Image: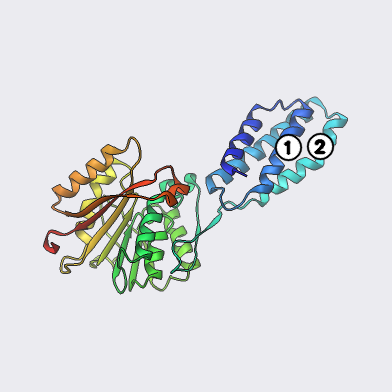
Amino acid sequence: MDLEGAFDDVMTALLCADKRDVDDVARVLDSLARFVGAVDETLTATHRMTLKQVGRQWLAAVESIWYQYGLNDDAKDLEAQFEEVRGALAAVTDHPTKTLFVHESLPPVALRELSFMEAGFGWQTWGASLVLAHAIATDQVDVRGRRVLEVGCGTGLVGIVAALKGASEVVLTDFLPEVLQNARFNAEANGVRDVCRVTKLDWRSPTLDADDDDQRFDVVLAADCCYEIEHAKLLPPVFQKYLAKTSIDARVHLINALRTGFDAELNAWEAAARNANLTLANVHTIHDDSAVDNGPAAEFRYYQIANPTST
């Protein structure tokens, strides 16, 4: 079943059903029950929370109308089905755990995803994260024995893969408390908490926890961080502050999806990087159809960035 398509159909049925028509209500109850029974890990947390909220509200509204106008015998026959559907909705977990097979050299990575309402843009694993994680897994980005910083970690996939590939230390950073808590959960679930630390990093005033703030990192990772012009302009100072200046191999690896209508954001990022005297050592486009599960983009712009002293 195409769950997203079926979800739209169920939402339409709930919104359009005649709540006073017993036959119409029975039809929608059957559709809702079938959909809830088919829910699996591919249904996002945002869809789940919407399903539960709208579904419960619809059930309550129908019952209120029937109570107001008096139940007839046909309506009474549906009472048991009402309770079954209500129980099934309650049993739908809010946060699905998605299993990703990044590369045959690594164990499967289990990631819990939040809803957009809880975590904003950190709610799911975006396509650029999959592409960057695969680059690490296949040693296109070498992290073995190195200190790694991930900015805008979201669910933590990229940093977790870096830890699994042998990074000596990984610091996962994001902004919202809910996103940070979820990244900690995912690091723990994948057995890398001893290597990974999760902490807040505000790009407007980039300061890590006291234990980390004087550190420089051999590798800085960023996936899909240029989705707003303001953010694109804020990233270069973060890279300048935390990318190791004494190592000729220190690099930032940034991958962003090429989305229709987002040229201004990438142009702003490239201009800001050059104004900050960062060296765009390697820039090219990646075609990757395996990442379309998390968005329509199948093309990504890859940037390898160095400090001026590292070139």
Closest to the camera, between mark 1 and mark 2, is 1
Q: Position of residue 72 (x, y in %)?
A: 86, 28
In the figure, is residue 209 to the left or right of 81? left
Residue 283's disc is none
Front-lying residue, 96 or 83: 96
The structure residue drawn at horizontal position 44% and vertical position 60%, both measured from the top left corner, is 183
The structure residue drawn at horizontal position 43% and vertical position 46%, both measured from the top left corner, is 120
Residue 29's disc is 1
Q: Secondary structure at mark 2?
A: loop
Q: Secondary structure at mark 1?
A: helix
Q: Position of residue 85 (x, y in %)?
A: 73, 44
Q: Does the rendering let one see residue 220? A: yes
> How packed is label 1: few (under 14 Cα within 10 Å), some, or many (20 or more)?
many
In the figure, is residue 147 to the left or right of 127? left
On-image quarter of the C terminus: bottom left
Q: Residue furthest right?
A: 73
Amino acid on which the number 2 mark rests in the picture: Leu
Q: Earlier in the sequence, mark 1 or mark 2?
A: 1
Front-lying residue, 30 or 82: 30
Q: Position of residue 278 (x, y in %)?
A: 16, 54
Q: Which residue is mark 2?
A: 78
- Say whether marks 1 and 2 touch (CB < 8 Å): yes
